[in-house]
Amino acid sequence: MRTDIFTYKNKLYNSEISSLPDRKDIDEKYKWNLADIYKSDDDWETDFKWIKNKIPEYSKFIGTLAKDSDSLLKCLKFDEEIGIKLERLHLYAMLNHDGDMSITKYQAMDDKVGNLLTQGSTAASFIRPELMKIPEERLLQMINSKNELKIYEHFVKNLLRSKAHTLDEKQEMILSLAGETVQASYNTFSLFTNADLIFPKLKDDEGKEISMSHGRFYAAMYSKDRSFRERAFNAYYEPYKNYKNTFSSLLNGNIKSNIFTAKSRKYKSVREGSLDVNNIPVSVYDNLIETANANLTPLHKWASLKKRLLNLKELKPYDLYVSLFSENKSKTYTFEESQEIV
């Protein structure tokens, strides 16, 4: 028996709610508890001001990293402390913003911390090229000379691995300053599609009028009513079609940003640069694609079987998620029950 923990009728956005509820009207137990990150927005502001005042202190480490192990340790510990706090600031602002992108307060906080991240990376941009100037053997000796430095061994070895793509101090600073700029197209797309894009209304599989949304789209794809699935599919993609020129421009901007970053770091392609972040050779990626393409027969058989069992002349994208089993074989759980199971 196939069990769906969340079926489309058991979602918060089910068809009994014709319009999407405002975030403020959602029960608190269904929202993220961000108090584990910061107890309040005021606590966030306190850390924000602390980091803003601390960032200029990076300058005292410039030109000291090759001096001795103690100097190197002080810089790396300082950078780690700033990095951890910046990540907390970013996570809190980002999750609050993602929770409801229409709240301008958290959009402003997200923008503020984005700017602070750029300031931090710019101030710290000397670290990477300065470490690369130290002979590799000596640098590793320095790392292994103190137990407190050994925790940075992976960080240092990862830098050494990317030595060919490390620029000088001035060039690294310029790339850091460009951080927010190269993210602009993606950030605009995310805000537009999650906050400003308006989806049409449609009749669900019970004849009730509902407002389409990202969540309702995926839920609708599990409906047994093919006509509803088709309507939901068209309703979801209609706004994207209406703004196709805008999305095309944003995509073009994002592609150009990726090309700029890859070329600046002397990669042969954007793909090589993206994979190198996780130390994945291009050959591994190519082999994965080739292997997948060479073994598509089971997928084709599955598609043919699904088309036959659903008694369809043609399998459409909105047919891919619907269950082959009857509704009475699909068990549903409440959110609380699923928490207990997990």
Image (cartoon, rainbow, N blue to C red):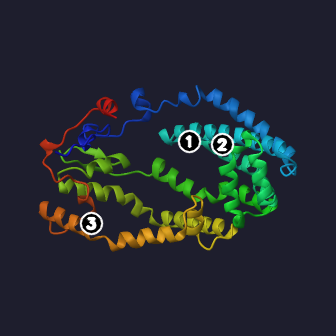
In the rendered image, the quadrant that contains the N terminus is: top left
* Mark 1 / mark 3, whichever is N-terminal: 1
Q: Position of residue 243 (x, y in %)?
A: 45, 62
Q: Position of residue 249 (x, y in %)?
A: 53, 66
Kind of residue sitting beneath label 3: Leu
Kind of residue sitting beneath label 2: Val
- Badge 1: how crowded within 10 Å, few (<14), some, or many (20+)? some
Residue 125, can we see it? Answer: no
> For mark 3, what is the residue?
299
> For mark 1, what is the residue?
94
Q: Are marks 1 and 3 in contact (CB under 8 Å)?
A: no
Above or below 31: residue 193: below
Observer-side mark, 1 or 3, equals 3
Q: Nearer the viewer, residue 205 or 172?
A: 172
At a point 18% along the width and 56% down the height, the residue shown is 226
Q: Quadrant of residue 236?
A: bottom left
Q: What element does badge 2 sit on?
A: helix
Mark 3 vs mark 2, CA separation in Å: 44 Å
Kind of residue sitting beneath label 1: Met
- Badge 3: how crowded within 10 Å, few (<14), some, or many (20+)? few
Mark 1 vs mark 3, CA separation in Å: 38 Å
* Mark 1 / mark 2, whichever is N-terminal: 1
Q: What element does badge 1 sit on?
A: helix
Above or below 148: residue 136: below
At a point 68% along the width and 49% down the height, the residue shown is 153
At a point 56% along the width and 53% down the height, the residue shown is 187
At a point 60% along the width and 65% down the height, the residue shown is 273
Q: Are marks 1 and 2 in contact (CB under 8 Å)?
A: yes
Task: Name the disc covering residue 27, or none.
Answer: none
